[in-house]
């Protein structure tokens, strides 16, 4: 996980979102790790990820980098529905990347990125970076993610979102009755609907939740449905989920372009790291993407930990990923 650096903030005096919403003092939250290093890496948070829970590789593959970890819009640390009532009703990866570019160039006075890296939604953010600022990014590392959210991925997300918005306490007036320390039923329903997708059938069959310190499936289920949702705002989760569903680098820019042509236009070297048992960011699309990338390579994570293999859940998988990133960056 990211080093326990203090969270810093950058306020954009004026920012226009892709949907046309114009706001002042739009806040980005970030960590600045090893700030004196000459090479710079940007790491974006994932869905329901916080800055300090993000796997930043600052003690491994990125140990000789200045690592800037940036919270996506909607995560509750950067500007989100929970932090301001005038926040737009929809956001895009393009919004996040434009704001992050302003942070790097205006606040931190940086002129290039040696590498942009991300897991899951962070990986889609990295893909958008390589698409939107092709001369700014040298390398991109995409972990358990893709350039476009597949139809299957989109539909999977419809389940947790429906569980959230149809719960009895999702409407804002109903939330006022919640006591301190309690978790809203809508958040518990969301966690329940999401949980089986995190890993793989084999992971459950082998009771690997016990490797995380849980004595039973029920204990792990409580962690996913209740404990992990403490402090989350339903509208923050929902707006990030909708951004994820709309993820597609071919939407970047004003002119229509095929996904294949957009991928061909990426100048950065790209390392794609899917997990062989990920249920929604599957390896297949990454292999197809690599056929169109000028300098793309796929290295599959050999694990039954599914999607969370890419987020630091299993030390063996993290070691594999760290080694692949180290090898990839050493070839520049």
Image: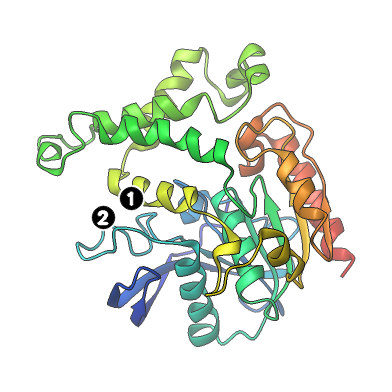
Figure check: 197 above or below 89: above
Q: What's the residue at 60%, 65% (across, down)?
A: 128
Drawn side of residue 313 relative to residue 88, left or right: right
Q: Quadrant of residue 221?
A: top left
User: Is there any visible trace of residue 34 in the rendered image?
Assistant: no
Q: Is residue 177 above or below residue 2?
A: above
Identify the element where label 2 is drawn. loop
Residue furthest to the right: 331
Q: In the picture provided, is 64 more to the left or to the right than 106?
A: right
Could you say which disc has been placed on residue 236 in the image? 1
- Mark-to-mark CA distance, 1 and 2: 6 Å
Residue lying at 15% horizontally and 39% vertically, measured from the top left:
175
Residue 177 in sight from this viewpoint: yes
Pinpoint residue 164: horizontal percent, then vertical percent: 31, 34
Which of the image's four quarters has the C terminus?
A: bottom right
Pointers 1 and 2 in contact (CB under 8 A)? yes
Q: Which residue is mark 2?
A: 82
């Amino acid at each position: 996980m990211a080093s326990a650096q203090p969270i810093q903030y950058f306020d954009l005096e004026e920012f226009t979102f892709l949907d046309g919403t114009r706001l002042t003092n739009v806040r980005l939250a970030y960590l600045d790790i090893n700030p004196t290093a000459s090479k710079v890496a940007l790491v974006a948070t994932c869905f329901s990820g916080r800055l300090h829970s993000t796997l930043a590789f600052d003690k491994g593959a990125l140990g000789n980098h200045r690592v800037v970890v940036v919270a996506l819009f909607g995560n509750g640390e950067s500007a989100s529905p929970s932090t301001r009532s005038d926040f737009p009703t929809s956001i895009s990866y393009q919004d996040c990347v434009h704001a992050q570019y302003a942070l790097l160039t205006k606040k931190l006075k940086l002129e290039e990125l040696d590498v942009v890296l991300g897991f899951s939604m962070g990986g889609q953010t990295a893909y958008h970076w390589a698409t939107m600022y092709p001369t700014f990014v040298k390398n991109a590392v995409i972990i358990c993610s893709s350039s476009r959210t597949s139809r299957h991925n989109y539909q999977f997300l419809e389940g947790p979102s429906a569980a959230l918005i149809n719960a009895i306490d999702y409407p804002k007036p109903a939330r006022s009755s919640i006591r301190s320390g309690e978790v809203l039923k809508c958040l518990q329903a969301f966690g329940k609907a999401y949980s089986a997708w995190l890993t793989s059938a084999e992971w459950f069959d082998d009771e690997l939740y016990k490797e995380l310190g849980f004595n039973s499936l029920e204990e792990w289920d409580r962690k996913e449905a209740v404990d992990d949702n403490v402090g989350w705002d339903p509208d923050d989760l929902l707006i990030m989920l909708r951004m994820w569903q709309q993820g597609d680098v071919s939407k970047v820019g004003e002119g229509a372009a095929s996904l294949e042509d957009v991928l061909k236009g990426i100048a950065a070297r790209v390392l794609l790291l899917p997990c062989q048992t990920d249920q929604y960011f599957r390896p297949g699309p990454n292999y197809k993407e690599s056929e169109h990338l000028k300098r793309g390579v796929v290295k599959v994570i050999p694990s039954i930990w599914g999607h969370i293999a890419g987020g630091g859940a299993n030390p063996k998988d993290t070691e594999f990923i760290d080694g692949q990133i180290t090898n990839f960056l050493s070839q520049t």
